[in-house]
């Protein structure tokens, strides 16, 4: 069957839109009037309250839209709504760092229905976005190359549909592209690298829908795909029930997190990448297990990519997966170092030891490097993701403890600690001679 | 998988708490008197800290191991839980 909506063209529900294992149920998309898509424009001339525009020359020329500015769209996903805080906040955050036309796409009426219906309604929304970009091109002289679509969940595939209809579209960012009805489907149906000149994606809920309720795709969809914290389970999403619902940002945010904490992390990370890009450096790697064990570190020249807003600064090879770790609550940025510690001590003892990185003005928390049998003379190594960009480390501190009363008053000390910075392979070496008792900080200075 | 936290004890950072003893970090932190308290990381060197007090929630967490919360300590302060200071390394040269 097929349905046509004037200038937007016709929409079929034959294969591959249905009639496959991944898409068993056929649904024709609703009409534009019943989806009631709205485009909410923010610019630096109207940073705090949006103007509603439509794909007509009069509406746009009457707004603060300027064709010399890059245009970025933000498209929400299933059950969500365009004037939800995160979309509005994302536009406002962007405007603090760049002069753009930021357009939140609100298709909530079309998204608050059966998932199988919403998954087809995005085809009409995508066509409407493409139509608006065409008006920018034809009537205002803005090249599609200067247009960037950011879509979360179903919104990512909506951006893919708009991109498919817009030759030469500059960029699409998929924030945890939706899995059901898209993963394993032909490229025509879902977001894929052919939909724009540069397609990047952030995966944060990659476990399978059945049985884990993982809403996001694990398969790569772009030229570059980022898998923060491995892409399946995000730190801070495993809080107990009451702590998750009564969220620090209120019950509404908590309920959203209860329903899809991992899935929503994608846009929360993206918003932070606008302000602190250096804290989201992705390391090219084949899988998360390798990365977490300390492999794929440090960055070779030009090999690493910055996740999120500035991902298009990456000039390396395509079809690459990137891994990184983030904090468990906002602010989310982290900076990766590898710490290698050689210890000495009065005798072998079980316990753990921490290291903290210092400069003259800044320092990090203590990070546990090892826990177990501490043997004098042995070397221990661990990658850590620190909460602060301390820059060039000028000294470090070592501390050990074993939470047991030690009548023999054992002492331990680090004889050498090397700290390698991930982004540029820079190595900082520190030496120490003295040994300390439990819970006493030993300072090591440059060798 | 990481150690699972409980509801009552062994709580991770960000989880609601009543007393610091419930938290893995042993700091049950509230930003102000009216807000809910959550487990939070202890204060690092050079950060604002609270001295250990009778009350079991803090406006600023106590310091990490090996550090001391240097600041003006007063009887009054410990009653209204406003003994704040800065974490310092006791062995660091002044």
Image (cartoon, rainbow, N blue to C red):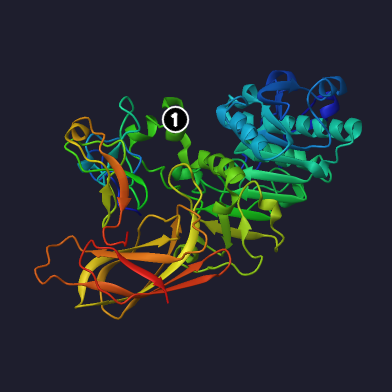
- For image coordinates 25% across by 36% down, the residue present is B57
Residue B23 image offset from top left, x and y in percent: 26, 44
Residue found at the far front of this picture: B94
Q: Quadrant of residue A75?
A: top right
Residue B13 image offset from top left, x and y in percent: 34, 44
User: Does A47 sit left or right of A369 as displayed?
Assistant: right
Residue A307 image offset from top left, x and y in percent: 60, 51
Residue B30 image offset from top left, x and y in percent: 32, 33
Q: Determine which residue is flagged by label 1.
A: A249
- For image coordinates 63% across by 26% down, the residue present is A82
Residue found at the far bottom of this picture: A377
| Residue A11 vs residue A143, the one in the foreground | A143
- For image coordinates 73% across by 21% down, the residue present is A52
| Residue A372 vs residue A227, the one in the foreground | A372
Secondary structure beneath dot 1 equals loop
Crowd around label 1: few <14 · some 14–19 · many ≥20 (10 Å): few
Is residue B27 in view? yes
């Amino acid at each position: 069957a097929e349905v046509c909506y004037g200038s937007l063209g016709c929409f079929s529900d034959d294969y591959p839109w249905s009639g496959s294992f991944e898409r068993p149920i056929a649904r024709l998309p609703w009409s534009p009037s019943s989806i009631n898509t709205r485009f909410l424009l923010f610019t630096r001339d109207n940073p705090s309250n949006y103007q509603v525009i439509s794909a007509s020359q009069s509406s746009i020329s009457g707004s603060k839209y300027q064709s010399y500015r890059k245009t970025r769209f933000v498209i929400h996903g299933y059950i969500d709504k365009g004037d939800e805080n995160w979309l509005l906040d994302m536009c406002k955050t962007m405007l603090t760092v760049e002069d753009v036309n930021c357009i939140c796409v609100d298709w909530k009426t079309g998204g608050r229905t059966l998932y199988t219906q919403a998954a087809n309604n995005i085809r009409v929304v995508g066509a409407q976005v493409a139509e608006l970009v065409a008006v920018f091109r034809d009537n205002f002289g803005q090249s599609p190359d200067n247009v960037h679509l950011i879509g979360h969940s179903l919104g990512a595939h909506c951006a893919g549909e708009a991109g498919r209809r817009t030759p030469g579209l500059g960029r699409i960012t998929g924030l945890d592209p939706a899995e059901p009805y898209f993963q394993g489907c032909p490229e025509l149906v879902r977001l894929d690298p052919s939909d724009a000149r540069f397609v990047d994606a952030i995966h944060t809920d990659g476990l399978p829908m059945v049985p884990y309720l993982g809403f996001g795709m694990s398969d790569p969809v772009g030229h570059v795909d980022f898998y923060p914290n491995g892409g399946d389970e995000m730190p801070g999403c495993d809080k107990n029930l009451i702590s998750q619902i009564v969220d620090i940002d209120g019950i509404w945010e908590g309920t959203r997190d209860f329903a899809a904490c991992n899935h929503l992390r994608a846009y929360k990370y993206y918003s932070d990448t606008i302000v602190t890009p250096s804290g989201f450096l992705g390391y090219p790697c084949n899988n998360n297990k390798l990365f977490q064990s300390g492999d794929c570190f440090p960055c070779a020249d030009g090999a690493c990519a910055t996740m999120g807003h500035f991902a298009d600064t990456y000039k390396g090879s395509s079809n690459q997966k990137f891994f990184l770790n983030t904090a468990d609550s906002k602010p989310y940025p982290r900076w990766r170092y590898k710490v290698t510690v050689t210890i000495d001590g009065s005798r072998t003892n079980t316990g753990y030891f921490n290291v903290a990185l210092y400069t003259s003005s800044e320092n990090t928390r203590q990070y546990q490097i090892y826990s177990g049998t501490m043997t004098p003379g042995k070397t221990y190594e661990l990658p850590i993701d620190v909460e602060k960009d301390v820059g060039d480390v000028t000294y470090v501190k070592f501390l050990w403890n074993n939470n047991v009363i030690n009548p023999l008053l054992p002492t331990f000390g680090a004889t050498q600690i090397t700290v390698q910075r991930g982004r540029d392979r820079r190595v900082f070496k520190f030496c120490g001679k003295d040994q300390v008792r439990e819970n006493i900080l030993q300072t090591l200075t440059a060798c | 998988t990481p150690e699972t936290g409980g509801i009552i004890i062994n709580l991770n950072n960000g989880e609601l708490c009543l007393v610091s003893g419930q938290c893995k970090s042993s700091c049950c932190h509230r930003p102000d008197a009216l807000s809910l308290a959550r487990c939070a990381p202890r204060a690092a060197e050079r950060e604002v800290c609270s001295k250990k007090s009778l009350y079991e929630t803090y406006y600023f967490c106590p310091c990490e191991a090996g550090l001391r919360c240097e600041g003006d300590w007063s009887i009054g302060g410990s009653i209204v839980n406003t003994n704040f200071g800065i974490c310092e390394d006791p062995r660091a040269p002044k």
